[in-house]
Structures are given as structure tokens and as C-alpha cells.
């Protein structure tokens, strides 16, 4: 079994009001990634993703493009300690 990793991604650009959170949750579910997504007060989106390295990297690659209507300027990623979280949710 592959190791489990956790990453926090701060996504900047036109990422609010375009279905970014909803689409991120769908992509995470499709990939089998646990974690959460939420809007930030500064207009960005924060994503925490936990899963195998391949699963998490696939979600991070998707975040760099985002859904139709979004325009991603940058994705800053930091390593976190896995928490054993199950499922993916949108937080408010």
C-alpha cells in the first residue's frame, strides 16, 4: 500500500463564484481523495487533500486548471501531517 500524504493548496485567481468548490469536491470524490475545500476572505480557495501521492498529485494538477469559468493564477502547496480523515467536504 502506498503511503498517505496530506497537502494544503491555496488557489488564487478567479476561483470564487464559478463553482470551484463544488467542482473540487466532485473531482476529489472521483479520485478518492479525503479533505476539504473552502473559500477564503481574500478571494482565494483553500483545499486540504489527503490520499496516496498519486491521488493527491492528480487533484493538485486539476486545481491548477480548475473548472470551466475559473482562471487560476497560482496554486501554493504546503505539506501537512496526514490526519486519517475520510471523505471530502465543502466548508463554509
Image (cartoon, rainbow, N blue to C red):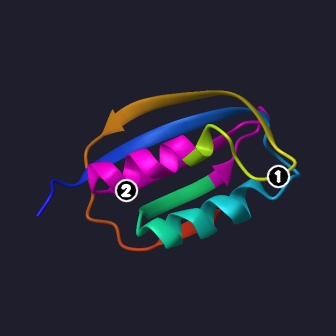
Report the front residue among 70 and 9. 70
Residue 12, horizontal then vertical, whole percent: 71, 30
Which residue is pictured at 63% across the width and 59% down the height? Answer: 24
For label 1, the SS is: loop
Whether residue 92 is visible, yes or no, is no
Q: Quadrant of the C terminus?
A: bottom right
The crowd level at tag 1 (other Cα within 10 Å; few <14, some 14-19, many 20+) is few
Q: Is residue 39 magenta?
A: yes
Q: What stretch is highlighted in magenta?
A: 38-61
Label 2 belongs to which residue?
55
- Whole-percent x and y of residue 87? 43, 74
Which residue sits furthest left? 1
Q: Pick whichever of labels 2 and 1 is earlier in the sequence.
A: 2
- Where residue 1 appears, as percent x and y from the top left, is 11, 64
The residue positioned 32% from the left and 51% from the top of the image is 54
Q: Residue at x 52, y 42 (%)?
A: 61
Residue 92 covered by magenta stretch: no
Distance between the Cα atoms at labels 2 and 1?
A: 21 Å
Q: Which mark is residue 68?
A: 1
The answer to whether residue 38 is seen in the rendering is yes
Which image quadrant is residue 46 in?
A: top right
Amino acid at each position: 500500500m502506498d503511503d498517505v500524504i496530506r497537502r494544503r493548496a491555496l488557489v488564487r485567481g478567479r476561483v470564487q463564484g464559478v463553482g470551484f468548490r463544488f467542482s473540487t469536491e466532485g473531482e476529489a470524490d472521483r479520485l478518492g481523495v479525503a479533505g476539504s475545500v473552502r473559500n477564503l476572505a481574500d478571494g482565494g480557495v483553500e483545499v486540504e487533500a489527503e490520499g496516496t501521492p498519486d491521488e493527491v498529485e492528480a487533484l493538485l494538477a486539476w486545481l491548477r486548471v480548475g473548472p470551466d469559468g475559473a482562471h487560476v493564477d497560482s496554486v501554493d502547496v504546503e505539506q501537512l501531517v496526514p490526519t486519517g480523515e475520510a471523505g471530502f467536504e465543502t466548508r463554509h
